[in-house]
Image (cartoon, rainbow, N blue to C red):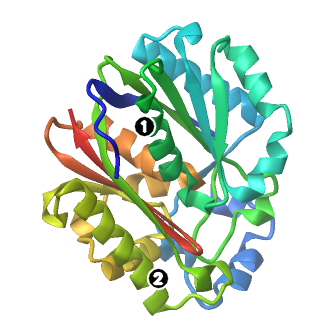
Amino acid sequence: MATEHEGVGIGSFACAFGDLERKPEDITDFEALWQAESPDTEFAAMGCGTFRTMSGPVDDYVLEAVRQTLRDGSVQPEDVDRIVFATSDVRLGALGPDFAVRVLDALGLVNCVPAVVSFQQCCSSLTALRQAWELFSDDEVNNVVLVSLDFVPEDSGRVRSFALFSDAVVSCLVSRGGAGLLKLASTAVGVDHAGLLGRDSFMSRQKVARDSLARVFQRADRRLEDVTKVFPTNLYAPVTLFNSAIAGLDRESLHFAGTLSAYGHCGNSDWMVNLADYHSRVGIRPGETYLAQSSAPGFFACGLLVGT
């Protein structure tokens, strides 16, 4: 359950996508890679148009996103108390042991304590959001930056049976007394042990999804019918729609098709990308309830957000 923190809000979302916009066929031996992953399946039905890759170090994209978040939130670097990074397990080593030091120094976050959340694949960012929110139990914490990042060093690793991986960094600001868009009402994460071992089934995936959703709604004293829009993981369109159906989510409530087509699957960042895109097109409205949802082999995570 998310703790009620008076005056704390979430906002100032900033996206730094890989600067190279590419088409799937730009990947060397794409057809062979695709057929190896999904034989006899037409890629054209997957909903992906282009994807993004980073031409420089991931640090540059982290700095770009966080600087934009701080500008939008009117927060000076020295006033940031905590920064929480979220990334997939396989990317931790690629960041290097001094990654946090490099980022803190380049941004001027001289009073900031860093942390990282991982080991939950693409569900790590929702756990990181929960951690960022709970940091406000300390009355001395006023500004926390959440940074979600994922990137793929080798093109051959982008093509999977369930998604086309892209590169992106997304950040947002959780602040006390600021002009946040949202409040965190509740979160839940579940594990499908069979899925961790690559032996998941329809029943195991459905159970972890429905159990997690039941907990997130019960903790916030809300119902599925209260949700205005769902921000899911950008897996291939048929996979996203299937996963949503077995979880009991209405396909009309999902906001993902446009961002999937433009950016593919940005790992931990997808729900944030979809939320930011929806806000730019429609607007997050006070009092409305939104569901952030992430899925990965072995995990299902969700969070309820309420417009302020």
Q: Image point 48% across, 33% down: which residue? A: 135
Residue 33 in the image, given as x and y percentages of width and height: 75, 76
Q: Is residue 283 visible from the viewing direction of this image?
A: yes
Q: Nearer the viewer, mark 1 or mark 2?
A: 1
Q: Is residue 17 left or right of residue 105?
A: left
Task: Identify whether 133 is placed above or below 164.
Answer: above
Q: Image point 59% across, 35% down: which residue? A: 84
Residue 199 in the image, given as x and y percentages of width and height: 63, 90
Q: Is residue 56 left or right of residue 189?
A: right
Q: Is residue 21 visible from the viewing direction of this image?
A: no
Q: CA distance from mark 1 to mark 2?
A: 28 Å
Task: Identify whether 52 is placed above or below 302.
Answer: above
Name the kind of residue labelled 2 in the image: Arg
Mark 2 element type: helix
Task: Identify whether 307 is placed above or below 45.
Answer: above
Q: Is residue 290 left or right of residue 103?
A: left
The answer to whether the residues at label 1 and label 2 have Cβ atoms under 8 Å apart is: no
Which labelled disc corresponds to residue 205?
Answer: 2
Name the kind of residue labelled 1 in the image: Trp
Residue 130 in the image, given as x and y percentages of width and height: 45, 45
- Other residues around mark 2 within 10 Å, as few (<14) / some (14–19) / many (≥20): many
Which quarter of the figure has residue 225?
bottom left
Which quarter of the figure has residue 110?
top right
**Mark earlier in primary sequence (1, 2):** 1
- Other residues around mark 1 within 10 Å, as few (<14) / some (14–19) / many (≥20): many
Q: Image point 65% across, 78% down: which residue? A: 196
- The residue beneath circle 1 is 133
Task: Identify whether 214 is placed above or below 184.
Answer: below
- Which quarter of the rendering shows the C terminus? top left
Residue 13 in the image, given as x and y percentages of width and height: 43, 31
